[in-house]
Image (spheres, rainbow, N blue to C red):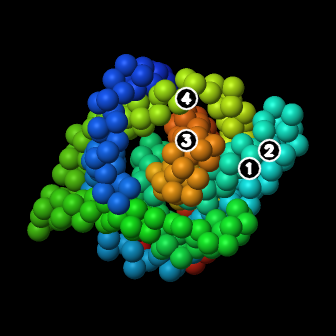
Amino acid sequence: MGLFERYLSLWVAGCMAAGIALGVLLPGLFAFLAGLDVAGVNALVAVLIWVMIYPMMVNVDLASLRHIGDRPKGLILTFVVNWLIKPFSMAGLGLVFFEVFFRSWVEPADAREYIAGMILLGAAPCTAMVFVWSQLTRGDATYTLVQVSVNDLIMVFAFAPLVALLLGVADVVVPWSTLLLSVVLYVVVPLLAGYFTRRMLLGRRGDTERVAAFSASLKPFTIAGLLATVVLLFAFQGPRILEQPGVIALIAVPLLIQSYGIFLIAYGWAWAWGLPFSIAAPAAMIGTSNFFELAVAVAISLFGLESGAALATVVGVLVEVPVMLSLVALANRTQRYFSEERPGDRGGNDVIGSA
């Protein structure tokens, strides 16, 4: 394990602090960088995410996709947790905390906006960062891709009606161009690049060791991309974070409970169902993390840049990175409780790419 991976939590904390400081000291620069977007997708963030995802995609063996239907449990878990549990639990936690526990500390109008922002986070499952979490837990690269792809397809059709239901809004304006372009940028383009790179490295002899060596050489860039993304996101929101520390702490409480709770549900279910660790860890990670760029974009579209809803989605970013790193550590420490394939798993478990 390298220096960056060994002390990744400390590096991330330092990058969060550096991002906030830079955002305050150089507001003009980061206002310019924030404006470099297409259909709401920031170009610089997109490049950094490519840097994180590309090494993961090189390891994806598309030929193994034909085995997906043989072992459906991981996909069922992903679907149920992300679409039947997570959005509703987030809405419920938001209501309980801001309508009951924090009622005397927050104005009702502000509370409704904070709840709305949390709902947007809960209804937007992760698209890009989950590849990083999967790699850090040595998850099955192909299956992680399939889980993300299935989520993306569902999100295209389910996100707007689900948000409308939970917000009680009849007509929700969703930035479809942002959503679809994000899927192309964060999944399709890196996948194609990884596919052609893999084919070139394998050659006619199918040299998998060459592929592994190439992926290992790119691993430092994955970590660097993660840290640079953290700096950039917190630089964009630095002044607002410093202006409202008390509110940020209140919003963080239900978000933390939601994150750890959803992970325990998904991870525990995966263990009880006999899923191998290489499937269980990514399945739990994708259920826990959020597509924060989409949530932020929709919050701004619906409620405005300075709204409580937009602030809540930014707090989601603040909470997510350290939480996900702690869950990566937890998953790696509990790997021994999972096996790659148990007796009788054939035909019922989710080990792909081995047949």
Q: Earlier in the sequence, mark 3 or mark 1?
A: 1
Closer to the eye: label 2 or 4: 2
Check disc 4: other Cα within 10 Å, few if <14, some if 14-19, many if 20+: some
Query: Which numbered marker is on residue 112?
Result: 1
Marks 3 and 1, how far apart at CA: 14 Å
Q: Which residue is mark 2?
A: 108
**CB under 8 Å between discs 4 and 3:** no
* Whole-percent x, y for residue 230 in the image: 42, 34
Q: Residue at x 29, y 38 (%)?
A: 32
**CB under 8 Å between discs 2 and 1:** yes
Count the marks. 4
Query: Which numbered marker is on residue 241?
Result: 4
Say above or below: 120 vs 325: below
Q: Residue at x 88, y 43 (%)?
A: 100
Query: Which numbered marker is on residue 306?
Result: 3
Say above or below: 265 vs 44: below
Q: Is residue 296 visible?
A: yes
